[in-house]
Image (cartoon, grey):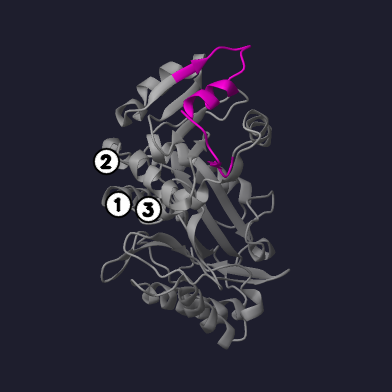
Amino acid sequence: MSDRAELYPPQRLAAAQRAMTRAGLDALLITPGSGLRYLTGYHAHALERLTCLVLPRHGTPTLIVPTLERAAAEASPAPATGLRIVDHADGTDPYPLVLRALEGPVVAVGLDNHMWAEQVLALRATLPQVNQRLAGDVLRELRMCKTPAEVAALREAGAAIDAVHARMTQWLRPGRTEAEVGADIANAIRETGHAVVDFVIVAAGPNAASPHHETSGRVIEAGDPVVVDIGGTMPSGYCSDSTRTYVAGGTPDPEFLAYYEVLHAAQRAAVAAVRPGVTAEAVDAAARDVITDAGYGAAFLHRTGHGIGLDTHEEPYVVTGNTLPLEPGMAFSIEPGIYLAGRHGARIEDIVVCTADGVERLNTTPTELAPL
């Protein structure tokens, strides 16, 4: 189990203060979500009651919480960061507390990218002369390169979701519905140590041509390609995400077998392309070129990958147009897919981390097609 003191070190607040100074911001205002958890270790509930970390460029950070949540905040790693906790009772206006915690005049603040609109508007009314920008522009540079402790947490998450894929023969077979298989998978995700089941996609036959199908009452038929894309959040807060494509007994369409070999080669090529200094778009091209050269370019509907950490989808995005050079510690998915509408589809996904001399796959189950 990952040590939460290593995952949420108190020096992150100081690092964020330095980053906001470089960005020309006077404060960050962070509400419940991965940004708050990253900075303080506090996994807060997103409620209509305001919870907000006020992180000024200079001065003491303040965590504003509802009175009924104060005990939870005090029990979290947040107090170890040196912040102060201020609470507000039901029926009182919490927004003057934000103004007080800023400790001086401000020109520009960074708001949490996922702050509720009603809170954005309330802060605009409280700070009418202050320019509002996105806090994500500051946090992105801090969160993209994972520490060794974060990589260890992602490795733990990868092993846990691999253990679910390794049991697929227990559930995935002709005659069962996608929803029945999905329910078994969800139970197994929890059994392997995840705290939360984030998503379960079981897409059989023509449903496999829809990348985000989830599950349905469709009965799985012999010979169906079945895309199984699953993930969850570990107690550490770090996420898993892995996709394998199976054949549920019988003989699949010969074209599926042909393009699966193309997909497999594309996924391996993209993984092999990962190393420091290579751009994110070059990794995307490594997969896309293989698929395009085989005549299936139009059937590859999405980017090759997304970053992962406290969110399933975060920076860096492995996509055409992203010229960001990879650095050691960047963790992301490699998940090319081929989708033939109305017929079938396939996707292969591993989480990888860029290392000092190349790449480490955090998912290690076989990617070759293995009929069940």
Give amino acid for label 2: Glu
**What is the spatial separation of the Cα atoms under label 2 and label 3, in whole angstroms?**
19 Å
Q: Earlier in the sequence, mark 2 or mark 3?
A: 2
Name the front one of labels 2 and 3: 2
Q: Earlier in the sequence, mark 1 or mark 2?
A: 2
Residue at 47% in and 52% down: 23
Residue denoted by label 2: 6
Residue denoted by label 1: 147
How far across and how far down the image is residue 175, in percent?
Answer: 62, 54
> Marks 2 and 1: in contact by CB < 8 Å?
yes
Residue denoted by label 3: 158
**What is the spatial separation of the Cα atoms under label 1 and label 2, in whole angstroms?**
9 Å
**What is the spatial separation of the Cα atoms under label 3 and label 1, in whole angstroms?**
16 Å
Q: Earlier in the sequence, mark 3 or mark 1?
A: 1
> Marks 3 and 2: in contact by CB < 8 Å?
no
How far across and how far down the image is residue 262, in percent?
Answer: 52, 81
Q: Residues within 10 Å of mark 3 (few under 14, many from 20)?
A: many
Image height of 146 relative to 249, above or below: above
Image height of 262 relative to 5, above or below: below
